[in-house]
Amino acid sequence: MTAVLTAPVSAPHWSVPREWVGERCFIICGGASVRAQRALIPRLKGRVIAVKQAVYLRPDADVLWIGGESMNELALPLLPVFRGTYAAVRGKSCRRLPASVLRVGRWKDHTTLSDRQTHVTGYDSGTSAINLAYHFGVSEVILIGYDMTGGRWFTGEHPHPMPQIPESHFVGHMAPLPKLAEDCLRKGLRVVNCSPVSRVTCFERKPLEAFL
């Protein structure tokens, strides 16, 4: 992750490869409940997508995934930590990022998984990561820190520029999730929310220990 070239704004979208067909994928999101499960995260076996600062917990994650408006500022301090395979962002501008950082577009219908390997659904990074895992071909997604409530778990150096998420964001992010959950089932993707505190009730719920 030390490329010196910068990616042009017009860089083509990455077509996510179907490399994890039939596998399980853990997605570590940014909700405050991650603090209660930090000791378990090094024990995760299988594919891992680290959302933003979750890379500090799993620098060896298969994917470092960053979505949102401030991705240049978010990504730059995280890239040196990452030791995995793919660093990817969701958005239009990659002006300040290394050429090795991949870019995908945002699907316009947030009630369904995008079937285009170059685009992902979701208003928030965690939901988009579900679609990313689907593109890789997994059959099961395990969500951690998918809270949609409260603040973020990470408060160290280089925190998220929005440490406390406005309630209006949560309301908007959650609105399409019931229909998205139905679409996941139709497409054969099992999604399990293992966040100990979460307002998202449309996905199956289980304790994280069940998957260790």
Image: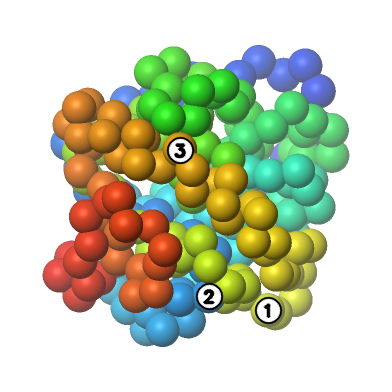
User: Which numbered mark, 2 or 3, is in the foreground of this view?
Assistant: 3
Position of the C terminus, as image quadrant, is: bottom left
Q: Which residue corresponds to the image point at 46% horizontal and 65% vertical from the top-left?
A: 147
Q: Which residue corresponds to the image point at 45% horizontal and 38% vertical from the top-left?
A: 176
Q: Secondary structure at mark 1?
A: loop
Q: Earlier in the sequence, mark 1 or mark 2?
A: 2
Q: Which mark is residue 32?
A: 2
Picture coordinates of residue 59 (x, y %)? 51, 63
Q: Is residue 168 left or right of residue 143?
A: right
Q: Is residue 38 above or below residue 167?
A: below
The crowding category of the residue bearing disc 2, from other C-alpha atoms within 10 Å (few below 14, some 14 to 19, many at least 20), is many
Tell me how far mark 2 sits from mark 3, CA to CA: 22 Å
Q: Amino acid at mark 3?
A: Pro
Picture coordinates of residue 47 (x, y %)? 31, 50
Residue to which mark 1 is pinned: 155
Q: Which residue corresponds to the image point at 79% horizontal and 62% vertical from the top-left?
A: 161
User: Which numbered mark, 1 or 3, is in the foreground of this view?
Assistant: 3
Q: Secondary structure at mark 2?
A: loop
Q: Which mark is residue 176?
A: 3
The crowding category of the residue bearing disc 3, from other C-alpha atoms within 10 Å (few below 14, some 14 to 19, many at least 20), is some
Whether tag 2 and tag 3 are in contact, CB under 8 A, the answer is: no
Picture coordinates of residue 180 (x, y %)? 36, 35
Whether tag 1 and tag 3 are in contact, CB under 8 A, the answer is: no
